[in-house]
Image (spheres, helix red, strand yellow):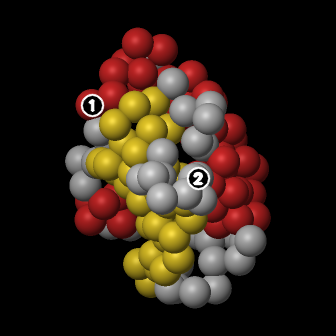
Amino acid sequence: MSVEDEQYRITAAASTLPPALTVDIRRADAEAAVCAVAGDLDIDSLLPAERALTSLVDEGTPLVVVDLEGVGFCDSSGLNLLLKTRLAASAAGVEFRLAAVATPVARVLELTGAGAVFSIHDSVGAALVR
């Protein structure tokens, strides 16, 4: 999957029901991309987020910011996706930041202690500052 377009939408469900998860990618500039995730980040719906984040890291986007403001639920598989992506980004020389972390995600990060390994910012704008 390529992120050549300025913005695209991936949905986890292809029905008339609201999607369980939406992922929007936008280029902040030539050096940074924002991946906005909205909905439930869980084992049943995380595939679109995984594909988008993997694509951004594989392309070598210098800075990837994950906007988590719209996440209403996050389970251990959602946390695992963020952790695996952080490791892959680090190995690829990509800076990986979380922004506008919604309460459900913040709670998971707090309970597991995983928040300590992420660069977490209050807003996407703050995360994009280099």
Residue under label 2, please give it. 12
Would you say 7 lies left or right of 56 here? left
Of the two numbered discs 2 and 1 in the rendering, the one whose residue sits closer to the viewer: 2
The residue that appears at 74% across and 71% down in the rendered structure is: 1
Residue 16 in the image: x percent, y percent? Answer: 48, 59
Spot the residue most to the top: 111
Q: Residues within 10 Å of mark 1 (few under 14, many from 20)?
A: some
Label 1 residue SS: helix
Q: Residues within 10 Å of mark 2 (few under 14, many from 20)?
A: some
Residue 2 in the image: x percent, y percent? Answer: 71, 77
Q: What kind of residue is marked 2?
A: Ala
The residue that appears at 60% across and 43% down in the rendered structure is: 46
* Residue 97 or residue 49, whichever sits in front: 49
Looking at the image, is 88 positioned above or below residue 25? above
Q: Which mark is residue 33?
A: none
Mark 2 in CB contact with mark 1 (< 8 angstroms): no
Residue under label 1, please give it. 103
Label 2 residue SS: loop
Quadrant of the image for the C terminus?
bottom left
Q: CA distance from mark 2 to mark 1?
A: 22 Å
The residue that appears at 75% across and 64% down in the rendered structure is: 58
Q: What kind of residue is marked 1?
A: Thr
Residue 105 in the image: x percent, y percent? Answer: 38, 31
Would you say 96 lies left or right of 68 here? right
Looking at the image, is 9 positioned above or below residue 84? below
